[in-house]
């Protein structure tokens, strides 16, 4: 049993009461109102409801809309920083534990990832990544060119080796979000779809039809749209493209990612594409991916799409004969330091953020929900939360209304 460290006490009127909460908050209809039913809001609703809180979740569209509908669903451990590693690994272990109860349409598979190296510098990165993961208990295998070719015969000869991470998995993200919301509902959560929130704060959420919901706690889980409801939160939209082919069972066995993907993900100014490809249970092949700042329209950008598909064909020439049956875009919610914002805002004690997950929100949704619920309930989280607290980024709005990090 984990220890409660701070201020929650068992209430008599509702499941939980906050010690010292203002009288107005005692009158709240809900313990938590979550805005956004993407994968992060869905995971929060599930976690909070299963802990006995009275939950409402409000979504202006359908469940798993937004970035969740656009994502690849790669459940991946990454190591850009210790904090990123901690949250991705913790979350991946939660996905593994969830596997037995996930419905079939989530299509949970564990193909593993192979990080592909094309030169000595990238092979050195393979070794570094192997050592890092090994030290932290993540199984990996360093592969030479021959082994990579045996595992993935359709790769071109440009690959000189790679790193297999067998515990990486894949899911269909909107189906996972639907499952989580449905499970939350079986624990009493109330779902309001087609309801656009126009304002939230101080324990109140106002909808576009003028109605209001009240909650002791509010969670802004609106992804790339977070700043529309909580001005001052420094999140930029980072557009991504994906394409999917017709069915080619057996063509691809693992999620394949070029090591150059990491350079692409780190670039802060330029548009970038990188080879990132995933086998679906249907035999279709999901081809990614791109990253763009400043492109806020949803339309597919043909130049970017062509660059992305050419990059894929460079690694897997046979893809040239496998046309895409569908292409689409989505918006990642990017923070300046590439870590999500999970926790309370200093200026409004009712308002919590669960946002800013950029390209890792499917993976990290489950860990996000756990550590947010832990913060609210005063339980000791299983990983340190400090790197994700919104208060780490103090900002001010200048006279022109634009944001600057202090
Ligand atoms: C091309 C692409 C590929 C990706 N691949 C992966 C991957 O392989 N693995 C991975 O881990 N991550 C991946 N990601 C990232 C992942 O998709 C996101 O990090 C994740 O979906 C974020 O979930 P979310 O719930 O925070 O936001 P969203 O999914 O965007 O959900 C936010 C929700 O809030 C709702 N909303 C917004 N404003 C309001 C309002 N005013 N009122 C009511 N509702 C509102 C929206 O309708 C939406 O449903 C990818 C992203 C992209 C774009």
Image: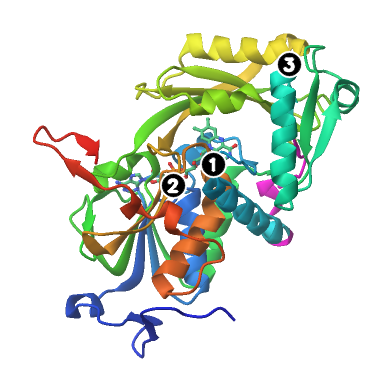
The answer to whether 306 is drawn above or below residue 360 in the figure is above
Residue 321 place in picture, x, y as percent: 74, 9
Callouts 1 and 2 close, C-beta under 8 Å: yes
Decide whether residue 103 is among the magenta residues. Answer: yes
Q: From the image, which quarter does the C terminus lie in?
A: top left
Check if residue 274 falls in the magenta segment.
no
Q: Secondary structure at mark 3?
A: loop
State the image quarter where residue 312 is shown.
top right
Q: Give the foreground label among 1 and 3.
A: 3
Q: Which contiguous range is marked in magenta? A: 100-113
Q: Quadrant of residue 29?
A: bottom left
Q: Position of residue 265 (x, y in %)?
A: 52, 28
Compare marks 1 and 2 and give the one earlier in the sequence: 2
Q: Dot 2: what SS?
A: loop
Residue 114 visible: no
Instruction: Name the residue tied to disc 3.
Output: 119
Left or right: 395 in relation to 344: left
In the image, residue 96 above or below residue 327? below
Q: Is 35 on the left-hand or right-hand side of 148?
A: left
Q: Is mark 1 within 8 Å of ligand 1?
A: yes
Quote the CA–CA distance across marks 1 and 2. Answer: 9 Å
Q: Which residue is mark 1?
A: 360
- Going 72% across and 26% down the picture, which residue do you hit? 124
- Asked whether the residues under the numbered discs 2 and 3 touch, taking CB atoms below 8 Å apart as contact, a structural biologist would say no
Q: Is residue 371 above or below residue 177?
A: below
Q: Position of residue 256 (x, y in %)?
A: 72, 28
Crowding near the residue tagged with mark 3, few <14, some 14–19, many ≥20 C-alpha atoms within 10 Å: few
Q: Which residue is mark 2?
A: 340
Judged by depth in the image, the label closer to the viewer, 2 or 3, is 3
Q: Earlier in the sequence, mark 1 or mark 3?
A: 3
Within-10-Å neighbours for mark 1: few <14, some 14–19, many 20+:
many
- Outermost residue to the left: 399
């Amino acid at each position: 049993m984990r220890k409660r460290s701070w201020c929650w006490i068992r209430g008599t009127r509702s499941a939980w009461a906050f010690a010292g909460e203002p009288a107005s908050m005692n009158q709240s209809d809900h313990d938590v109102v979550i805005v956004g039913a993407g994968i992060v809001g869905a995971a929060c609703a599930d976690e909070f409801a299963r802990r006995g809180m009275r939950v409402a979740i409000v979504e202006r569209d359908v469940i798993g809309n937004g970035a969740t509908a656009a994502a690849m669903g790669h459940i991946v451990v990454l190591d850009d920083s210790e904090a990123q590693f901690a949250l991705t690994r913790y979350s991946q272990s939660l996905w593994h534990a969830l596997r037995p109860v996930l419905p079939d349409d989530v299509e949970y598979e564990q193909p593993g990832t192979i990080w592909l190296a094309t030169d000595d510098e990238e092979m050195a990165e393979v070794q570094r990544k192997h050592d890092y993961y090994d030290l932290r208990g993540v199984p990996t295998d360093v592969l030479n060119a021959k082994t990579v070719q045996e595992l993935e015969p359709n790769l071109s000869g440009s690959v000189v080796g790679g790193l297999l991470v067998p515990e990486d998995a894949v899911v269909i993200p909107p189906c996972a979000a639907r499952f989580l919301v449905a499970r939350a509902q079986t624990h009493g959560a109330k779902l309001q779809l087609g309801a656009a929130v126009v304002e939230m704060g101080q324990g109140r959420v106002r909808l576009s039809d003028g109605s209001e919901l009240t909650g002791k706690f509010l969670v802004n889980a609106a992804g790339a749209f977070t700043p529309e409801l909580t001005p001052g939160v420094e999140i930029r939209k980072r557009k991504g493209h994906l394409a999917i082919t017709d069915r080619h069972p057996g063509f691809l066995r693992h999620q394949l990612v070029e090591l150059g993907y990491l350079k692409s993900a780190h670039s802060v100014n330029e548009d970038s594409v990188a080879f990132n490809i995933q086998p679906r249970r249907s035999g279709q092949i999901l081809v990614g991916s791109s990253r763009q700042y400043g492109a806020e329209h949803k339309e597919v950008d043909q130049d970017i799409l062509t660059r992305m598909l050419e990059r894929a064909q460079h690694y897997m020439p046979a893809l040239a004969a496998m046309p895409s049956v569908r292409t689409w875009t989505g918006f990642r919610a990017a923070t300046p330091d590439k870590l999500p914002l999970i926790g309370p805002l200093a200026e409004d004690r009712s308002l919590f953020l669960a946002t800013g997950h950029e390209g890792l929100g499917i993976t990290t949704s489950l860990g996000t929900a756990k550590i947010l619920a832990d913060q609210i309930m005063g339980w000791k989280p299983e990983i340190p939360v400090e790197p994700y607290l919104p208060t780490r980024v103090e900002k001010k709005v200048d006279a022109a209304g634009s944001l600057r990090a202090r």
